Amino acid sequence: MADTVNAVRTAAASPAGPRSFRWNAGLILGLGMLAVVALVAIFAPIVLGGQASGLGGTPNLGSTPEHPLGTDTLGRDMLARTLVATRATVLMAAIATALSSITGIAIGIAIWLAPRRIRELGLRAIEFAVSYPTMLVAIIVAAILGQGVVQVVVAIAIANVAGFARLTANLAAKIATSEYVTTARLMGVPASRVAARHVLPNMAEPTLILIAGAFSGALVEISGLSFIGLGAQTPAFDWGTLLNDGLNKIVVNPIVIVGPAVALTFTSLAALLVGDGLAAAANPRSNSTQARLVRDKAAPTIERGDAVLVADGITVAHGASGATLVSDVSFTIGRGEVLGIVGESGSGKSLTASVVAKLLGEGLSASARRLELDGVDLLGPVPPRELASKIGLIYQDPGTSLNPAMVLGRQLSEVLTLRLRHSRRASRELLLSKFRQVMLSDPEGRLRQYPHQLSGGMKQRAMIASAMSTDPVLLIADEPTTALDVTVQREVLTVLGRMNEESGTAVLFISHDLGVVRALCDRVLVMKDGKIVERIDDMAGLSAESVSHPYTKQLLAATPVVTLPTAAPTARTEGES
Amino acid sequence: MSTQTHESSPVSGPGTPVLDGPPRAASLGGAWRRFLLRRGVGLVINLALLVIVTFLIVQLIPGDPATAIAGESATLAQVELVRTQLGLDQPFFVQFGTYLLGVLQLDFGTSFRYRVPALEVVMAAVPFTLAITVAAVILLLVLGLALGMAVGVATRGDRRRWLGGTFNVVTGVISSVPVYVQATAFVVIFAVLLRVLPPAYSPAYGFGIAAILPIASLTVGGMCSVARIVRRETAVILEQDYMRTARGWRLPALSLYARHMLPNLLTTALTLSGIILTALLGSALITEAVFAWPGLGGVIVQAIAIDKDYPIIRAAVFVIGLISLVITLVIDVILGLIDPRTLGEKRG
């Protein structure tokens, strides 16, 4: 479920705009169906009460115009009985759900906030409770308290408490170990505040979905208990008892099970639609078109020359709204050159990089007059092998860009074995040599580790090693130091600079930080609102006087000067994170 | 996947900085040892709790348990007989001691109805319940995962809206039909109308033939629920940074989905499967009634609703609880193999 949280963050960062609640057909339909059920529950006993329990009709009728769903063994109309039973059934399920959710969430939060020992103990207790099938807990309670409506509600409520407590505790634990909450705690924010500000809001969505599911579950379970004779006892009746009555006549008069069966399914479906609708509403996926990269008809304005990368007139638009996100961005990168693109978030710098990498996000469409990498036309179809070997990629957050479920050796060398057709052993050796080059301690051991066992800086160095293992002609680094702390930033920058010097790989370096860019890049483009506003060719003579655009002057004024020593002091070692 | 368990490295695990020598990568051996120790202790505690709970089933009956169990029409002598049979005439702690000693020797007392050791009656029913439940869980996990993944990948980034919509409606409706209603419908369709499968268990039919309908009715709804969850999870995982990284490596689709996406999906699917399995055990208890299936469900419902056969109730609850505990442990071990982050102490 932590992935849900990630998705929410992704959604918030997507070009579609801020996270918002969106109504959808499923949610509206589900709520509508629930409203129908509620109205029936309120009015059916008033209007049809007499007909549902009045005796004297013809027993065991099939479907007739007068009794569309037949009559039971005592001649009572099954349609009326089904509708009247709505109140008892739904009320029982709703009360059981309310009891279990309130108690369960309270227990879950209490356990999470408790001291470590009590928390461990509490989690064991929950696990024990959850390991009992709901039905078994209900049956135990029925065995102790006897059969009846109240007993069944209590039984199902008790049985479901553990589920809510476990979900709450697990969600809280998962969110609590997520990086932003760890950050908050390290900053000394009290636990109760962390719970209120970070943990609870992120739990609301899965909890609401669970409540919808639990209601549907309680409905089915309570009716199930009545069905086997442990729930409502005559003369009280709910859908479960009606179904049981019908089952006895299933061969002779199957129509009588239709009423309770359909009613149960309808209500359970309504709850499910609401749950799903809530999930979809809180987490909208606004992308409606596939990513497209097309050739602009206009003639190219930049000649190829001897540049490694020629990008001429890159334009990116949002597929659905048509809003232009990047307009007419052109640049070249020479062999061994480091080109920086600086700009604030939303300036289009990362989108530009994703076009060059042919990794444009869903829902976007891009065009360019010319886009060539090392003589390969990126606007046409390019074999994946070619792309894999020519472009190395480093991403912003090493914490999320490595697969948590795979050891490093496996995931970082896959591109070598699968795309570049190296043998397993050769891939391993190659990766090891790159690990040594980026100064990772104990390279052999790292291959067997999972990403969560490494610190952020080590993960990013491993990423760099992997990106360089294909010996690419262009390395695209999209904010590679933003998620790292300052000293680690320095190390990563130094490693990048050294890789560039030693292997002569051209680098496209994206950052919002002019100070970082200044330390590494030969030339810099400044982007704002999807356009290049300044081209800085002379990095040595960079000063407030040498730039013309006011935005660049602002950036410059806000950046302290960072210089990198040429002899890299990266030999310092790092502990485990 | 098991290579990390027999790590030769002496380092005790993540989180323990090495003080001397060159820094070495931590192995997972320590994490596994701590995990197994913790879970072993947990299992023992859970067993103890299980003994206490089953003991209390009788003690917690409101009023005088012996009178309640013997029934309203019982004579005084019958009530007293029940009282001595369950040891209710003894002091509380003596009762518990006797019960505990009995359980340690696998003796839950003699069934009131069948006049044989209660555990024998229960153990005779266990294979029947396990057979349909385990078959249903494996089927619904495999089919649900495959279906959910296929639809999730096919509808990624809002492709093929019609497929997504159809999938949602069909699986939604099917998974909202209660298992026992589905079972009833299956009986009507396949046994009453088409007459191709037996309506209920009977030694006259082969075990396999008779098990088809119970397994099918336990599988179909759960499969749809799993498929829905997996599809949603697939969409979420496909948007993760590490999937973008994998696309950046230009990996072929098979590796992308089977190696990079599936393990992350399995974490969710297996976490769910524990919950589904215990829920399914519960559904099985009711569904067995529809098919007259000679499993634990029939035994326990009969013991509670009709016979008030408390030795059997205790034995059945103990056995079902034990099965659940073992399955939960097995699932957590598999989860740990797939995603070692779940070995951490912070997880529940």
Image (cartoon, helix red, strand yellow):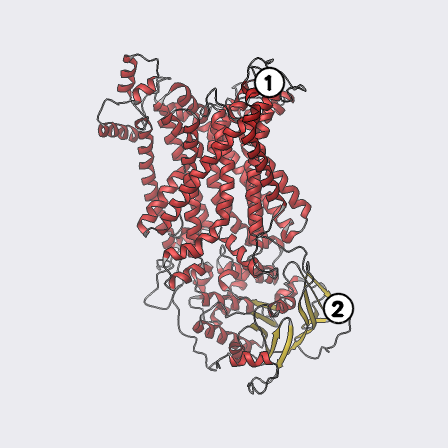
Numbered circle sitting on residue A71? 1
Mark 1: which amino acid? Thr
Q: How far apart are marks 1 and 2 (CA)?
A: 73 Å
x, y percent for residue A387: 64, 65
In this view of the protein, can residue A361 be seen by the observer? Answer: yes
For the residue marked with disc 2, what is the amino acid?
A: Asp
For residue A57, what is the image quadrant? top right
Judge whether B286 appears above or below A454 on screen. above
Identify the subunit bearing mark 1. Answer: A
Query: Residue A178 in the image: x percent, y percent?
Result: 45, 57
* Residue at the spot of label 2: A296
Q: Do the residues labelled 1 and 2 touch (CB within 8 Å)?
A: no
Closer to viewer: mark 1 or mark 2: 1
**A429 or B216, nearer to the observer:** B216
Q: Visible in this render: residue B216?
A: no
For image coordinates 35% across by 61% down, the residue present is B16
The chain letter for the residue carrying disc 2 is A
Query: Camera-side residue: A281 or A335?
Result: A281
- Residue B206 in picture, x, y percent from top left: 55, 23
Q: Is mark 1 on a helix, strand or loop?
A: loop
Task: Give the quadrant of the C terminus of chain A.
Answer: bottom left
* Tag 2 secondary structure: loop
